Amino acid sequence: MAESQTGRVLGIGGIFFRSANPESLAAWYQEHLGLKTEAWGGTHGTSFAPADMPENSFTVWSAFPPGTEYFGDARQPFMLNLVVDDLDQALANVAAGGAEVIPEKEEHDFGRFGWFEDPEGNRVELWEPPLELPGEDAD
């Protein structure tokens, strides 16, 4: 593809999903993860500016095979991955809010990961990016 070609994807513009009670779910995420939500007509949401993200974070688009167990319940067609500044504290916050925290955590060169199920049963991945990405030279 030529670099000057237009009509190409530049990033993720939003994540939209159904909720049995959007107002209640938004309030839960606001209380336990600090997600500042607001009402937008019949929906509740927030927006993130790229400048608000940690330096070593990025957005991933990834299609998984239909039999994946990575999302938890096989009926869940997607999984959110939220960037956090402190994985352990974020998991403690959601546990205090009644979420089921998955006991396993993973640590890789590109960060730490943990999971929980929100009040509506959605499995959510939390990602704490590393201070430095692999291959970067420390200043």
Image (spheres, rainbow, N blue to C red):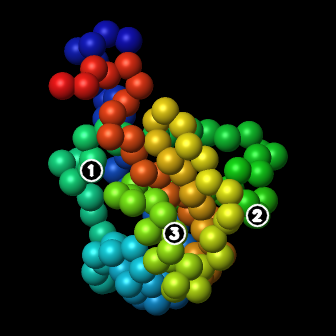
User: Which percent across, then down, holds residue 134?
Assistant: 41, 25
Q: Amino acid at mark 1?
A: Met
Q: CA distance from mark 3 to mark 2?
A: 20 Å
Q: Badge 1, how many Cα within 10 Å: few under 14, some, many 20+?
A: some
Q: Are marks 3 and 1 in contact (CB under 8 Å)?
A: no
Figure disc tally: 3
Q: CA distance from mark 3 to mark 1?
A: 19 Å
Up the image or down, 128 lies above or below 64; here it is below
Residue type beneath disc 2 = Asp
Q: Is residue 71 left or right of residue 83?
A: right
Q: Amino acid at mark 3?
A: Leu
- Specify the farthest residue to the right: 67
**Where is residue 21 drawn, in percent x and y?**
52, 87
- Comes first in the chain, label 1 or label 2: 1
Mark 2 element type: loop
Q: Mark 3: which secondary structure?
A: helix
How far is the residue under mark 1 from the one under mark 2?
29 Å
**Quadrant where the N terminus is found in the figure:** top left
Label 2, on which residue? 73
Q: Residues within 10 Å of mark 3 (few under 14, many from 20)?
A: many
Q: Which residue is mark 3?
A: 91
Which residue shows up at 46% across the image and 77% down it? 93
Per the image, label 1 sits on a secondary structure element best described as loop
Mark toward the start of the polypeptide (3 vs 1): 1
Label whose residue precedes the other's in the sequence (3 or 2)? 2
Which residue lies under the disc numbered 1? 53
Of circles 3 and 2, the one toward us is: 3
